[in-house]
Amino acid sequence: MTLCLDPADIVFQSFHHTETPQPEWETEIPHWRSYVQHFFAANGQALSPQDERVPAWINSPERAAFCDMIAVLLPRLAEVIEPARVKTVLMAHWTPDLHMGTSVVNAAIHQMGLSACLAMAISDRGPDAALFALDGLNDCLAGKDEDGLLLIAEQKTLMYASPLMEALQPQNNACVCLVNKQQRGLRYRGFKRASLAQWSAGWLSQAIEQLGLAKGRVTLIGPTRLLEVAPADAHAFAINPHLVCAAPFVALRTLWEPQRDYLLISENDNGISVCGLAAAEGPR
Amino acid sequence: MNIAALATYIPPARVSIDQVIAHRGGNPAEARTFGQLFGLRQASTLANEESAEGCFQALLQQLAASLDDGEQIDAVILIQGLPAGSWRQSVNLAALRQQSNVIAADAPLLYLNQQNCATVFWGLRLAERLLAGGKHRCIALLVGDTLADFDLAERYVPGCTMIGDAFAAALLKPGGGQRQVSGIQCFYHPGFWQGLDGSREDIKRFYQSHNDLVAHALATYPQDLRKRAWLLPHNINRLSWQTWLRHPDNHHQAVATDLISDCGHCFSADPLLLLERYAPQDTGRPALLLSVGLGGWVGCAAVTSDASPEPVHAQ
């Protein structure tokens, strides 16, 4: 059985905030200052006072927590999620959660009434974490007649200055995908990695072929600069980079048309990741 | 799987509950009440020149003495449970491997931190799986946390516990022996997903469920084993265990709580610190190790000596 993803089973939303700062939270500023300073020290770096943002983090009007965003989205999939079939829940994100100490996967398991789940988060990887997690779901569900949940979330409020995040301008957003083994929707065809040096029209064409996608009807979904290598007549759509990990899935949900194959493209520090999804029907 | 060698280190330095509560802006009366109610009077702490990595290095040297000629540690699993990182809490496993002449150069270095004190049981289960795979024969499990870099106030969890520093290292090998580990259970109860970030109400609900979570975990062992065993639990506080003992089902259970007043709740290391002091070959009784972590993570395992009857299989 092949892992499938029906674009109708993708839900997503951007959020301005999910919680409003309370005056008493200010008493926690020393605690969080200490936390973030030691967090930097543990990673062999010093956090200068001008780069520390704890008061702004505490008082931000745009605080959005992963569990609260995911909790809004899950009911929208309640009709298609069969709790007895879901025993794997993977979470993907790049930006750090606003809340530390909550388990987002356990919150989802609890909310949906699932039991005996394998659940984990793919963190600190890069914007391709959700593609990596989709491939992880394919591994976890291999040989099983089960479905799985992919949770994706990002948020913008950090305790420290980060040139990387300032350039990226992440949006508070979340996305939930139900993957299935019931042969509903697009067929998952695999995950491939390329180094930045390898990335070319030739590599892309070979990957499309190796993943068993039909050249004539494949749509490329990825960051603008990576799509530049695609042939001029290619069907290519640029993702919204501010959605970070969720971006290719949000684009897939928005652009999907019947009878087309999709190549989702993302990147991290070390290279480029792609996932192939093929149309359910039609000549191969 | 057998714990072929076990070494522990509780740093000799102590901070008193009065000092800790004073750093939180509390007064001596609060400290006295807390101490009397929860049995927590002091917490062990690393001295300035000590670090988690240094402690593990010394413990590994002690373990090395028990290795056979030419025998090497072929995998290292580091277990920590505290969510906050700091300079002296962080452990460079690659450096430890390089400095040690008993860790194989190609030994995988694995780090588990589920941000709660029950993580050690996930580490034991991982070791058991690696050994069952046959590729590994001798695994070092390093367990321990420190809060020494942080303000003293961070050691205090009102209405619950005081956190101390301590470390344990175990050599795990396949087969039986004086400390045979079996019936490793790793539970999570997703209803407590809020963890450390929970509201006062969430955390109260978790504390109130402590007895039920313990009962659920221990129910996996045969009744006769439970009756004979020393329960070696996390040193959360004395009141929790007194309350638990009041339940008719638990009246006769032997529970080791003597480290609570000595070193505090040394997070992931507690059950192994107690195992060194309540070894089945010394007590003549099996041991049940158990931790209940905030967030609904519960782990337990049985440790029996070859000298005592049957190894335990969880039901």
Image (tube, rainbow, N blue to C red):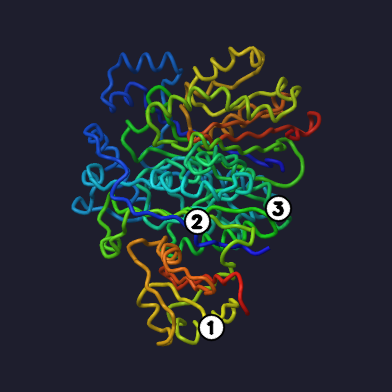
Q: Quadrant of residue B292?
A: top right
Whether B248 is drawn above or below B162: the answer is: above
**Image mark for residue A215:** 1
User: Disc 3 designates what residue?
Assistant: B137
Residue lying at 27% horizontally and 18% vertically, measured from the top left: B27
In the rendered image, which residue does mark 2 sit on?
Answer: A177
Q: Are marks 2 and 3 in contact (CB under 8 Å)?
A: no
The one of A269 and A179 positioned closer to us in this rendering = A179
Residue A247: image x %, image y %? 40, 64
Left or right: where B170 falls relative to A38: right
Disc 2, SS: strand
Which amino acid lies under the numbered mark 2 shown in the image of this protein? Cys
Amino acid type, label 1: Lys
Image quarter where the N terminus of chain A lies is bottom right
Residue at the location (43% across, 14% down)? B37
- Label 2 vs label 1: CA separation? 26 Å
- Point out residue A280 in the picture as x, y percentages from the top left corner: 60, 69
Taking depth in this image into account, of A233 and B118 the one nearest to the observer is A233
